[in-house]
């Protein structure tokens, strides 16, 4: 046991080098560098040499701490969770609280160039938008019943959301305006564990309330040969990522979900944004 991975290589791995020496050489990551002007995101650039805790003995290989595994996974998450379009913008957060959950990694993907403005909406506003999204068109009374709120309270919030251009009247009710939500918004949540894959799976399953995909990430030596774990995760629709001292890869793809929950709307509105129409367009949809 010792600090840093063992081996006979003469050079230190890129993730343990001082600032200014980080490399990003995978083809899937080069596209992202091109979109950002050839500059790696700040989270990739180390500010100091990183000491990794990794057991090198063949009889007991693995990470000493979960944060050591997260360090490797975070640096490789863009390539590991890359979308099929290959043209996407990624925001990656560590231990970002979402409702009552705190995933180890939260990855928010969006299409570059979409005209959306980040908005800090309240949870209640997001709950109203999410409920209306699922219903298509809904009355204020039904919104109040669905959110266990008073109709007058809901009515005041709806007026505000209409003024913001996020909702409009339709057939005696209200609905979310078309194109309010970005079409390319996609949320992925990852739970990291060193050995307890069943607990990781329970937590990752909870993330499906707000994530389009949920994954568990464990050392390759723990999860890779475990057929029971892989089968159980597949049944739950949760993907599996194996991580070793220098790399990570998806060995089981997660099932895509469409949560449209208040938490999902809040993540998207905060980090990707919502589309607000012009003043003239908003005026034509003001409640009468």
Image (tube, helix red, strand yellow):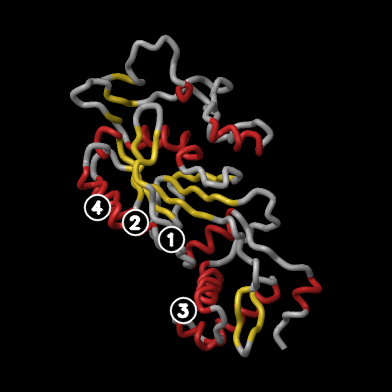
Quadrant where the image shows the N terminus: top left
| Number of the label disc, if any, that sits on residue 147 | 3
Give the number of the mark in front: 3 or 4. Answer: 4
Measured in 3D between alpha carbons, the distance from the residue under mark 1 to the one under mark 2, in whole angstroms, is 9 Å
* Residue holding disc 4: 232
Measured in 3D between alpha carbons, the distance from the residue under mark 3 to the one under mark 4, in whole angstroms, is 34 Å
Outermost residue toward the left in this view: 59
Q: Give x and y (percent) for residue 285.
A: 72, 80
Displayed quadrant of residue 212: bottom left
Give the number of the mark in front: 2 or 3. Answer: 2
Give the number of the mark in front: 3 or 1. Answer: 1
Displayed quadrant of residue 181: bottom right
First along the sequence among labels 2 and 3 = 3
Task: Decide: is 208 above or below 163.
Answer: above
Measured in 3D between alpha carbons, the distance from the residue under mark 3 to the one under mark 1, in whole angstroms, is 22 Å
First along the sequence among labels 3 and 1 = 3
| Number of the label disc, if any, that sits on residue 237 | 2
First along the sequence among labels 4 and 1 = 4
Q: Tell me if mark 1 has few (under 14), some (14-19) or many (20+) residues whose alpha carbon lies within 10 angstroms of its own.
A: some
């Amino acid at each position: 046991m010792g600090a840093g991975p063992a081996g006979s290589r003469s050079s230190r791995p890129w993730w343990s080098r001082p600032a200014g020496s980080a490399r990003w050489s995978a083809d899937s990551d080069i596209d992202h560098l091109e979109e950002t002007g050839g500059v790696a995101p700040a989270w990739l650039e180390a500010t100091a040499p990183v000491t990794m805790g990794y057991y090198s003995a063949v009889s007991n290989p693995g990470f000493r701490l979960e944060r050591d595994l997260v360090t490797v996974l975070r640096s490789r998450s863009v390539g590991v969770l890359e979308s099929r379009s290959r043209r996407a913008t990624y925001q990656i957060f560590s231990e970002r609280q979402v409702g009552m959950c705190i995933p180890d990694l939260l990855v928010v993907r969006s299409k570059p160039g979409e005209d959306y403005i980040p908005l800090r909406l309240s949870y209640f506003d997001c709950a109203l938008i999410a409920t209306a999204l699922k219903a298509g068109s809904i009355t204020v009374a039904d919104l109040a019943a669905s959110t266990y709120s008073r109709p007058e309270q809901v009515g005041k919030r709806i007026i505000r959301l209409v003024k913001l251009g996020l909702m409009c009247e339709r057939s005696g009710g209200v609905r979310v305006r078309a194109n309010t939500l970005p079409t390319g918004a996609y949320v992925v949540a990852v739970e990291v564990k060193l050995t307890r894959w069943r607990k990781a799976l329970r937590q990752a399953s909870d993330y499906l309330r707000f994530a389009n995909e949920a994954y568990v990430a464990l050392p390759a030596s723990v999860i890779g040969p475990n057929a029971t774990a892989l089968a159980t995760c597949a049944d739950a629709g949760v993907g599996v990522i194996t991580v070793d001292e220098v790399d990570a890869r998806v060995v089981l793809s997660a099932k895509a979900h469409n949560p449209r929950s208040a938490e999902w709307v809040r993540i998207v509105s905060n980090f990707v944004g919502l589309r607000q129409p012009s003043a003239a367009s908003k005026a034509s949809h003001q409640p009468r």
